Amino acid sequence: MNAFLVRTVDGAEVLEPVTAQTQIKKGDLVEYQVLLTNNGKDRVRDMRVALSLPAGAEFTGFVSPSIGTQASADGSRFVFMPIRSSVNGTTQNLPFAQYQALRWSIQDLGIGATTVVKYRAIIR
């Protein structure tokens, strides 16, 4: 997994790689990326990738790819985003702060092909 600080420089969004020397502080926006490469001998038809959200980071709602992405409030039961719950008989979206994990379904990854999944979180 790679992490990048998301900054705005001269009106443009810039991703700065997080290294051991990077000073991360409360309120920083971080983009987490995972590169997935098919090193096998066959095309991958359907692969599920689940990532736990780091402690001290609050999910922002940004994911890529977004189609078919699932989320979990307990780290084990995944549903398509947004997570919805019933509060006093009214169905509401669960706040992103309560999300614990994300899961993607990667379809049809060719031999030697690479794809990336990513999400953003604010450091608390």
Image (spheres, grey):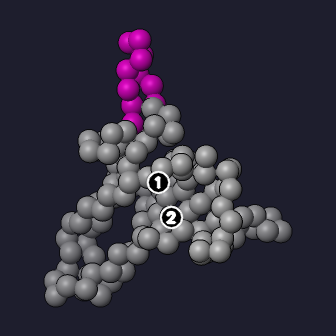
Q: Is residue 98 something one can see in this rendering?
A: yes
Q: Residue at x 29, y 88 (%)?
A: 112
Of the pair 88 and 111, the residue shown nearer to us: 88
Local SS, label 1: loop
Residue 11: quarter of image = bottom right
The residue that mark 2 highlights is 32
Q: Are marks 1 and 2 in contact (CB under 8 Å)?
A: yes
Residue 121: which disc? Answer: none
Q: Is residue 123 left or right of residue 101?
A: right
Using residue 69 as the reference point, say whether residue 25 is left or right of it: right
Q: x%, y% of residue 74?
A: 33, 39
* Residue numbers of the magenta segment: 83-93
Q: Please tell me whether the stretch drawn in magenta is mainly helix, strand or loop.
A: strand
- Kind of residue indicated by mark 2: Tyr
Would residue 88 be counted in the magenta stretch? yes
Does 107 lie within the magenta span?
no
